Image: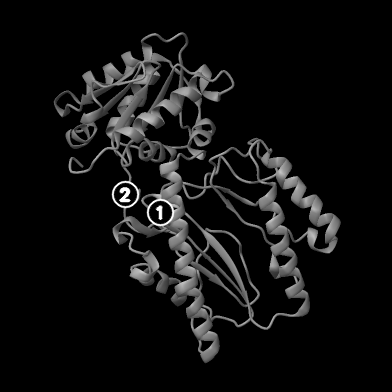
Amino acid sequence: MCALNLDIGSFEKRIAKLYADWEDLNSQLHDVESIIVPAGKVDSVYGKTLSLHVNFVFSLLIYIQMWLFGYELQDTVIVFNKQSMVVLCGKKKLDFLHPLENRHFGNRTVVLIPRNPADKDKAGLKKLVDCIKSGAKNNKVGHLAKDKFISELTESFMSSLQEEKFQLVDISYSISEILATKDETELILLKKACDITCNLFTKHLKEQIMDVIDSDRKVKHEKLSSGCQTALRNSNILSGLDPDNVEMCYDPIIQSGGTYNLKFSIESDTRTLHFGIIICSLGVRYQSYCSNVIRSLMVNPTDEQSANYTYLHDLFDWCIEQIKPGVKISDFCQAIANKVSTERPKLAENLLRNYGFVTGIEFRDSNLLLSPKSASTFRRGMTLNFNLGFQVSRLK
């Protein structure tokens, strides 16, 4: 850990953004006096290849750490109050965070507390509790309710809070909103991730599928999927970027043969590629930032299939034009449904009702879905995975 470099400039900008939202009278954060980020231990957080089909943990606890520091800090407790950020962690993480100590970020400071196994961190935990108490006008503490990384340290910390009878308030949605708008550094990384994903599809997967079709070979969906992992190391795909900073967001999904499931939680199966409608989904992460692409390939389509696809393509272009800062996501979704109902009433019941999600460090932020039930609005700097489709298994 100590060999890694902390980007102090990025930290300063992002900690200022967090506190600015906290001070906003309209923010969910405004009523809480402290924010806690207790991250325990987990086997499958960032690092090796991510698959949605293994026991992988998605957690805002980790995402907010990576957003602030550039790295995950397991078995670490962070407490924010209105005056400071206090961190209780082990020596290696302490060395990594040391450049922040005794520096002022606005009128706030960073305090580092080393762990002490000799007293089972009792003194350190007391300092964290005192940090929460100091200057508090109420006993409301913001936390990420669904995110639980358990370790002896985090359990001891949460027990300390229970003894003090603090009122825990779920701030998950507000944290998602903060992470949703990206700064210029993040946008550059996201664009690079998108470039790699497009290269992987265009220069590898699409060519592989076309070769299978042209040679009339029998190849299983899962083989085409696994081949993407190998191709991701090729220099013509990466365009000179360091392969150590690149990994799949999930195992690529290839579907054909009339049975389709447009969810990212499925796997490519063992069936042979069918030369009809082929749907490909794949996404690449670059330096922790995610991208995704879904493409439909049609072999000898019927006139109806071609017409439906042309309409879908035009509808997609229209939708992109409607995505503007200040537009309510629910209104956007309703406008799509209304347009299809008016123009293609027979297709309306086949239209997917969820249109994607906000993406970034987290591939799919479940707090910010592009769905009719969303309470959010589009904001400048948001990065979206927008997908539009008809459930083709129900179409001729």
The residue at which mark 1 appears reads as 55
Instruction: Look at the numbered discs 2 and 1 and tell me whether their residues touch, using CB distance below 8 Å.
Output: yes
Q: Earlier in the sequence, mark 2 or mark 1?
A: 2
The residue at which mark 2 appears reads as 43
Q: Is residue 100 above or below residue 340?
A: above
Q: Would residue 68 be found to the left or right of residue 173 on screen?
A: left
Residue at (62%, 56%) from the top-left corner? 387
Q: Position of residue 202 (x, y in %)?
A: 49, 71
Q: Is residue 321 above or below residue 119?
A: below
Residue 390 in sight? no
Residue 238's quadrant in the figure? bottom left
Q: Position of residue 252 (x, y in %)?
A: 47, 66
Q: Nearer the viewer, residue 347 or 148?
A: 347
* Separation (CA) of disc 2 from disc 1: 9 Å
Residue 379's quadrant in the figure? top right
Q: Nearer the viewer, residue 65 or 383?
A: 383
